[in-house]
Image (cartoon, rainbow, N blue to C red):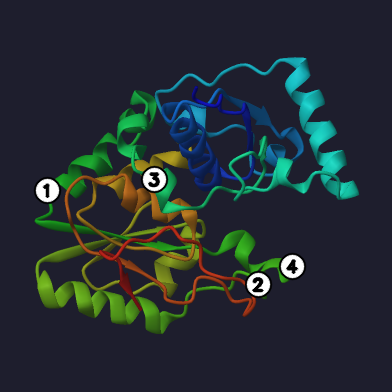
Amino acid sequence: MTARKPTKIVCLKGGLGNQIFEYCRYMTLRESGYKTLLYYDRARLKQHGGVQIAECFELRLPGQSPWVAAAVCALKALRAAGVAPWLCDDCDERALLIDDYSQDIRHTTGARRWLKFRTEAKECVAGMEREIAACPHPVAVHYRRGDYLHPKNIGNFGICPPEYYAAARRTVLSRHPDARFFIFSDDTEWAETGAPNEASTVVRLPQGAPDHAAMYLMSLCHSHIIANSTFSYWGAMLADGNGMKIRPRQWFAAKDWTTPNIFDSSWIEM
């Protein structure tokens, strides 16, 4: 007789990039035969603008019953007390609570099937969509600044240096001399002068457009030069085709933080 698989509770938290990883984990578990529930970590979602994934993609998130919140509180209390640690151990098949960011390429194989951008995200940037489509080889380049420049974050995350972007551009141009670079950043004012402007266009979203519209535009590009950011990672991962995907070799500034297992052999390290 086949053993019954345990119920899993996946915590949804963080910004859009992390929410996508967590949703992919949720869907992977469901398709593997687990009864899987979502717990909405309101405190950690509020820090990043709430549940953004449902606003970005055509999907319906499940509701949350009161007992799920109670179960999570109980499991976290057991974890804090060191009791039955396997209940919250992400690497243990018996675990009931999945409370990490689920950043693992093993959970992302169905991402393009599960995640379709909402029409609203497309309509508000139709003009830029046409501009990208008109290029023989559009390349998305992402500069993550914003919160990474905060004193509490700079030592952990860090900012990708100019040398990284310069080397990445040279690599793309060596294969695609007709490349056009579309610059995406959470600091467009800086990007106008701080990013290379040769064969480049700084993307400015229309007033009122959601941030995830930038991810949609990234996904339309053929090749990608990403920052150490899950936002631009997903812009590249959700793109069609087999363009060049370039990423920083050093994902975190903190020496004791390890690069997550989210890249396959097709990515180019720099």
Q: Secondary structure at mark 4?
A: helix
In the foreground, 106 or 245: 106
Instruction: Of the two numbered discs 1 and 2 on the same chain, state the one appearing first in sequence.
Output: 1
Foreground disc of the pair 1, 4: 4
Asked whether disc 1 touches disc 3, contact meaning CB atoms under 8 Å apart, the reply is no
Give the CA separation, mark 1 to mark 4. Answer: 41 Å
| Residue 62 visible (yes or no) | yes
Question: Where is 103 relative to 183, above or below?
Answer: above
Foreground disc of the pair 1, 3: 3
Q: Secondary structure at mark 1?
A: loop
| Image side of residue 24 versus residue 252, left or right | left
Asked whether disc 2 touches disc 4, contact meaning CB atoms under 8 Å apart, the reply is yes
Q: Which residue is label 1 attached to?
A: 134
Give the CA separation, mark 1 to mark 2. Answer: 37 Å
Q: Which residue is label 4 attached to?
A: 152
Amino acid type, callout 4? Lys
Foreground disc of the pair 1, 2: 2
Give the CA separation, mark 2 to mark 3. Answer: 23 Å
Disc assigned to residue 215: 3
Q: Which residue is label 2 attached to?
A: 154
Q: How many marks?
A: 4
Picture coordinates of residue 102, whole percent (x, y) = 55, 48
Quarter in which the C terminus is drawn: bottom left
